[in-house]
Structures are given as structure tokens and as C-alpha cells.
Image: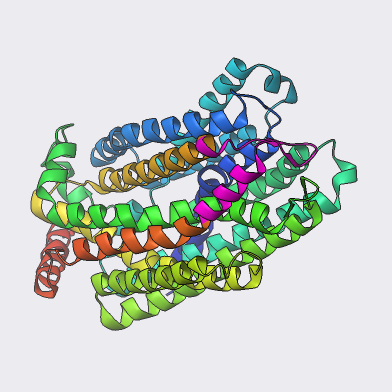
């Protein structure tokens, strides 16, 4: 029992850097570049965010399966374990995130040097984040369904504690603007504290986790080849179905959270008469938006975790999550058509909270399915493919981010989105800004409806039955017992 508590505490703490990095690089970096980096003009911050970031996410996606295969190759030979790579990843993610949000002001006058700087540290983040293999660790730690839920749910809940301060970031910067030269410097200082604290706690967590060497059952018998990446995708049907469905589920969250900050900023805080942004109001509403994005995910994780324990059916959990998300998309579409969100931020936040609750419910069953596909790969081939499978999950996640950013980037270019950072003034056409706001409002509703419908249809094709699961777990447990005798 003491060892179990230690494992839960350890795997929860070690996940803090992973979640902080995802929030910073996947969610906030785009907004930071377009609205807080003082590079204006045709090749300015908006152009960098609309073209460079999607390209970087795409390159990240391409390299992830190879990185995952390398980790499995090393682990399968008993040289290192997943925990070693996790500790290395924590340091790399923390360092690169810190540097990306501390871009020297002198680089902003030279777009070529600035792009080189961003690319360099993004790739350090890319390699580091590919080492943060929670699912791979969990698969080696236990075959018990309920323990796996705990190992998935608690890191998510504790990780949310690490991102709570982000809710108050812009409010902090506004209240302490006299202590910083500009808003970008204030954001960088705030982020630095969070990164350093989360890094220290994550490294402590890595030391607490006891990683079982379950994979030694195959180490002396089966070699691991690069072609196993393609074979795994072809033969692992549960993995293929889950990842196809997860593409659409993840795309909902990526696009919604990306456009929400822009929608709140320009729809509720911009004064069209004067042409200036109400910075105080925006710092307050950004805090409310952070709470709206945070609380529903916590409850969604708790509810889905409880449901999965009761039903012992991860697919059912995914379907319930999708149904709630699609339903809220329909509700928001109706309200958007009738113009109810135009001046009513409270209604927008309330509906967005319910929508994100549905998205949050997908986390536990989605991760259970990832670990289950790791079991399936080991069951059918006898080869450890934990890191490869988790890397493919990241591969598709990066494709989602790349596609979502490229899509939003096209809209920025169409609507001529451009701001003056220090003066908080919009430089483009006011009519185009109104069009962008309306477009973002409709996307908030349409994307969940379309993507959710596709995801639900795909998950109906998931091939594993309860009998298949029982036989798979029984066989894997028997193999492990035979090897450890």
C-alpha cells in the first residue's frame, strides 16, 4: 500500500512539467507571438505564428515516431528505462520553454535571426517532450484496470495545480506593469517561476516512481526493428481505430482553446469607437476564461474516471464525452445565430464551460485506450512498443495542432489581423475585425459538431470486446509470471 501511494505521488508530480509545457507551447505560444511580440508588418509576429508554428508542429509530428522507436529500442535491450528518458525530457522541456518565452528584444528587429532562435529552442522542446512517456510507464507498472485509472487520473488533477497560476498571469502583469519594461517581460518573469518550480517537483516525482521491468520477458528473445513502426500501425487495429477517432476529438480542443482568447479579447474588450483595447478588462476576462477552461476539465476528469471504474468500458466513456461535446456545439450554434454572445460574456463563458466539460471527459478513457493498445501490441508480437505507440499519439496530436494553427492562420491573413503590442491598438480594418470575431464565434460551435460526429462513428468500429480484453490481460500476466519464476 505504501509503495502504491508513493507511485501515485511520484507519477503525479512528474507530470507537472509535461502539462506546463503543453499549455505554454501548444496553447499560449501562438497568442504570445501574435499579441505580445513586437514584430509588426507583413513578415511580423502574425506571419511567424501563421506559418512557422504549423510547420514546426508538422516537423515535430514527423520525428515523433522515430524518437519513440529509439526509446523502445534502448529499453528493450535493458540499457535504460522509461524513467531515465522522462527525467531527461523534464530538463529539456523546462529549459526550452524558458528560452522561448524570454526572446531578447534585440532579435525582434531581425526576422531571420528571430525565426532561427524560435526554431532552435522549439526543437529542443520537441525532443524533450517526446521523452515524457506517461503511458509507457503506466503499462509497465500494472495490468490492473482500476490502478491504471488512478495512474492516469491523479497526474491530470495534480498537473492542473501547476497550471492554475496561468489563470492569473495577465492579471498579474497588468497589476505590476510598473515593475517591468513591457508586458512581454512581465509574462516571461511569471512563466520562469512556474517552470522552475514544476521542473523541481517533476524530477522528485521521477525518483519516487517504481518502474517494473515487465519488458524483460521479451528482451532476450525478440529483436526490435525500425519496420516495426509500420507493422504496428498496420496490425494493431485497436490502436488504428482509437487514433483515427482521437484525431477529431483532439482537434476540437485545439481549435476551441486557440480561438477563445482572441474571441474574448476583441469581442468583449475592444472599444470600436476609440480603436483601443481595454487592457484592464481583458486581464480580468482572461482570468475568467482561464477558470472556465480549468474547472470543467477537472470535473470532466473526475466524472470520466468514476464512470470508467464503474463501467469498465473506455469506449463508452469516449462516446459519452463526444455526445456531450456535440450537444453543446449545437446549443452554442443556435445562440450564435441569434447573436446572444455578442455582448453577453457570462453566457459565452457558461456555454464554453459545458463544452469543455465534454472535452475533459475524454481524457481518462482516451489514455486508457492508449495503454490498452500497448497491451495489444505486446500480446500479439511479444515486442515492447510502448514508446512507439505513445509517440504516434503525439504524432497525431502535433498534426492536429499544425492543422488547427494553419487553419486559423489562414483566417488571420484573410482578415488582416495585426496589432500594435505596446499600445494595445488594432492596426487592421475594423470591419475585418468584426468579421473575424463572428467567424470565430461560429467556429466554436461548428467544429465540435462536425468533428464530434466523425469521432463517434469511428469509435463504433473499435474491435476489442470484453472477452478479448480478459483473454489478453490473462495471457500477459501468465507470460510475466513464467519469466519471473
Magenta range? 414-440
Residue 404 appears at what percent x and percent y? 42, 45
Residue placed most toward the observer, 163 or 340: 340
Residue 281 is situated, as x and y percent measured from the top left of the image, at: 77, 59
Point 61% across, 50% down: residue: 434
Where is residue 115 shown, x and y percent of the image?
A: 56, 22
Q: Residue furthest front?
A: 431
Indicate whether residue 316 is drawn in magenta.
no
* As drawn, 270 above or below 455: above
Give the side of residue 18 with respect to residue 150, left or right.
Answer: right
Q: Quadrant of residue 288?
A: bottom right
| Magenta stretch encompasses residue 420 | yes
Q: Quadrant of the N terminus?
A: bottom left
Task: Inspect this view and state whether residue 212 appears.
Answer: no
Q: Name above or below for residue 54 compared with residue 440.
A: above
- Is residue 469 shown above or below 21? below
Q: Nearer the viewer, residue 79 or 286?
A: 286
| Residue 280 seen from this side | yes
User: Where's residue 384, x and y in %?
Assistant: 21, 47
Snapshot quadrant of residue 311: bottom left
Residue drawn 49% across the image and 55% down it: 15
| Residue 435 left/right relative to 174 | left
Left or right placement of residue 109 versus residue 126 in this view: right
The residue at the point 32 percent across, 45 percent down is 396
The quarter of the picture where residue 379 lies is bottom left
- Residue sitting at 74 percent across and 25 percent down? 105
The total of numbered circles placed on residues is 0
Q: Which is more toward the observer, 451 or 381? A: 451
Instruction: Give the camera-side residue of 368 and 196.
Output: 368
Q: Residue furthest right?
A: 178
Amino acid at each position: 500500500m505504501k509503495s502504491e501511494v508513493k507511485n501515485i505521488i511520484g507519477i503525479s508530480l512528474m507530470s507537472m512539467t509535461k502539462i506546463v509545457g503543453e499549455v505554454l507551447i501548444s496553447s499560449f505560444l501562438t497568442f504570445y507571438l501574435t499579441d505580445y511580440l513586437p514584430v509588426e508588418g507583413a513578415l511580423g509576429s502574425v506571419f511567424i505564428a501563421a506559418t512557422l508554428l504549423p510547420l514546426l508542429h508538422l516537423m515535430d509530428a514527423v520525428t515523433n515516431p522515430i524518437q519513440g522507436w529509439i526509446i523502445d529500442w534502448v529499453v528493450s535491450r535493458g540499457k535504460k528505462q522509461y524513467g531515465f528518458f522522462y527525467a531527461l525530457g523534464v530538463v529539456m522541456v523546462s529549459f526550452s520553454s524558458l528560452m522561448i518565452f524570454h526572446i531578447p528584444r534585440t532579435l525582434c528587429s531581425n526576422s531571420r535571426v528571430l525565426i532561427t532562435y524560435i526554431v532552435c529552442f522549439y526543437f529542443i522542446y520537441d525532443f524533450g517532450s517526446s521523452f515524457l512517456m506517461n503511458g509507457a510507464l503506466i503499462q509497465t507498472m500494472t495490468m490492473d484496470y482500476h490502478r491504471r485509472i488512478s495512474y492516469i487520473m491523479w497526474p491530470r488533477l495534480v498537473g492542473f495545480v501547476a497550471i492554475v497560476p496561468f489563470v492569473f498571469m495577465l492579471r498579474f502583469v497588468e497589476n505590476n506593469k510598473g515593475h517591468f519594461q513591457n508586458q512581454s517581460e512581465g509574462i516571461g518573469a511569471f512563466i520562469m517561476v512556474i517552470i522552475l518550480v514544476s521542473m523541481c517537483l517533476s524530477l522528485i516525482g521521477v525518483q519516487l516512481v517504481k518502474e517494473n521491468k515487465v519488458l524483460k520477458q521479451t528482451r532476450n528473445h525478440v529483436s526490435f526493428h525500425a519496420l516495426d513502426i509500420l507493422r504496428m500501425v498496420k496490425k494493431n487495429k485497436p490502436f488504428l481505430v482509437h487514433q483515427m477517432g482521437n484525431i477529431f476529438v483532439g482537434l476540437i480542443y485545439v481549435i476551441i482553446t486557440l480561438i477563445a482568447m482572441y474571441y474574448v479579447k476583441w469581442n468583449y474588450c475592444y472599444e470600436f469607437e476609440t480603436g483601443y483595447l481595454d487592457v484592464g478588462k481583458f486581464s480580468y476576462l482572461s482570468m475568467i476564461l482561464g477558470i472556465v477552461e480549468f474547472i470543467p476539465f477537472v470535473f470532466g476528469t473526475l466524472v470520466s474516471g468514476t464512470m470508467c471504474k464503474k463501467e469498465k468500458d473506455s469506449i463508452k466513456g469516449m462516446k459519452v464525452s463526444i455526445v456531450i461535446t456535440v450537444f453543446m456545439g449545437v446549443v452554442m450554434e443556435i445562440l450564435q445565430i441569434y447573436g446572444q454572445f455578442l455582448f453577453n460574456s457570462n453566457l459565452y463563458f457558461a456555454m464554453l464551460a459545458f463544452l469543455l466539460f465534454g472535452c475533459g471527459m475524454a481524457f481518462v478513457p482516451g489514455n486508457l485506450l492508449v495503454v490498452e493498445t500497448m497491451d495489444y501490441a505486446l500480446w500479439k508480437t511479444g515486442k515492447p512498443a510502448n514508446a512507439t505507440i505513445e509517440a504516434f499519439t503525439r504524432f497525431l496530436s502535433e498534426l492536429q495542432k499544425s492543422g488547427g494553427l494553419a487553419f486559423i492562420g489562414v483566417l488571420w491573413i484573410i482578415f488582416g489581423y495585426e496589432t500594435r503590442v505596446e499600445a494595445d491598438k488594432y492596426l487592421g480594418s475594423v470591419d475585418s475585425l468584426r468579421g473575424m470575431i463572428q467567424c470565430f464565434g461560429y467556429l466554436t460551435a461548428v467544429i465540435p459538431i462536425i468533428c464530434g460526429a466523425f469521432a463517434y462513428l469511428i469509435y463504433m468500429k473499435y474491435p476489442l470486446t470484453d472477452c478479448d480484453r480478459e483473454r489478453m490481460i490473462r495471457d500477459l500476466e501468465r507470460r510475466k509470471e513464467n519469466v519471473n519464476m
